[in-house]
Amino acid sequence: MRNRFGQCPGGQRGPLTGPNPTDRGKLGSKIHLICDRNGLPLSVGISGANLHDSQALIPLMRGIPPVRSRFGPRRRRPARLHADKGYDFDHLRGWLRRRQIVPRSARRGVENSNRLGPHRWVVERTMSWLNGCRRLHRRYERKASHFLAFVGIASALICYRRLRRSGHS
């Protein structure tokens, strides 16, 4: 039975939650992010905490909007994608190569992920900016669409602050 808000009574968390493998199995959500080399979020998404990162890559890549360039037409795809070992799978590398995107990630079981240090630091810094928004640090919303909307608002706020700091406003 659902209440007037379309939610089941007694449901503690909404959809897109799952048992967190690092937090004693508590239900939680994970924020996925693709950003440019300056740390501006290009595409964001959410999933359950138990979803493997590699399953979120293709929807995130499809969510990148066309980016205006000073020279030439709008770019619809990045030239390279720097990713950690969690995205090193043959089907993802093939999918990226078919779209003429060069995958740059450490090989699982072969290479050390330290070579991605400067690129990974940019993503970790952007995630830290997102976690600085208190509303995103812990998920209060039952509906996944509301939580995703707050993630989008926080991403827009990050872009605004970066552009204001660089003097483009």
Image (tube, rainbow, N blue to C red):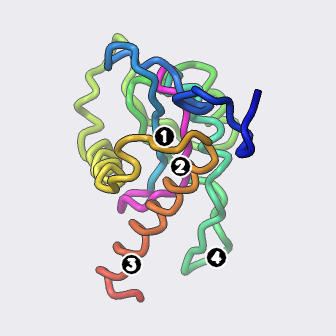
Question: What amino acid type should be assigned to the residue bearing mark 3?
Answer: Leu
SS class of the residue under badge 1?
strand
| Res. 92 image quadrant | top right
Identify which residue, 64 or 5, lies in the foreground.
Answer: 5
**C-alpha span from label 1 to label 4:** 30 Å
Tell me how far mark 3 sits from mark 4, CA to CA: 22 Å
Distance Cα–Cα, label 3 vs label 1: 22 Å
Q: Residues within 10 Å of mark 4 (few under 14, many from 20)?
A: few
Based on the displayed image, in which of its 4 quarters is residue 8 positioned?
A: top right
Asked whether the beta carbons under mark 3 and mark 4 sit within 8 Å of each other, the answer is no
Residue 48 lies in the magenta stretch: yes
For label 4, the SS is: loop
* Residue linked to disc 2: 44
User: Mark 1 highlights which residue?
Assistant: 32
Q: Which residue is drawn at 44% across and 41% down?
A: 139
Q: Name the residue under label 4.
A: 72
Amino acid identity at mark 1: His
Q: Which residue is drawn at 59% across and 31% down?
A: 16
User: Tag on residue 15?
Assistant: none
Measuring 45% from the left and 28% from the top, which residue is drawn there? 28
Residue 114 position (above or below residue 167): above
Residue type at mark 2: give it: Val
CA distance separating discs 2 and 1: 6 Å
The residue carrying mark 3 is 163
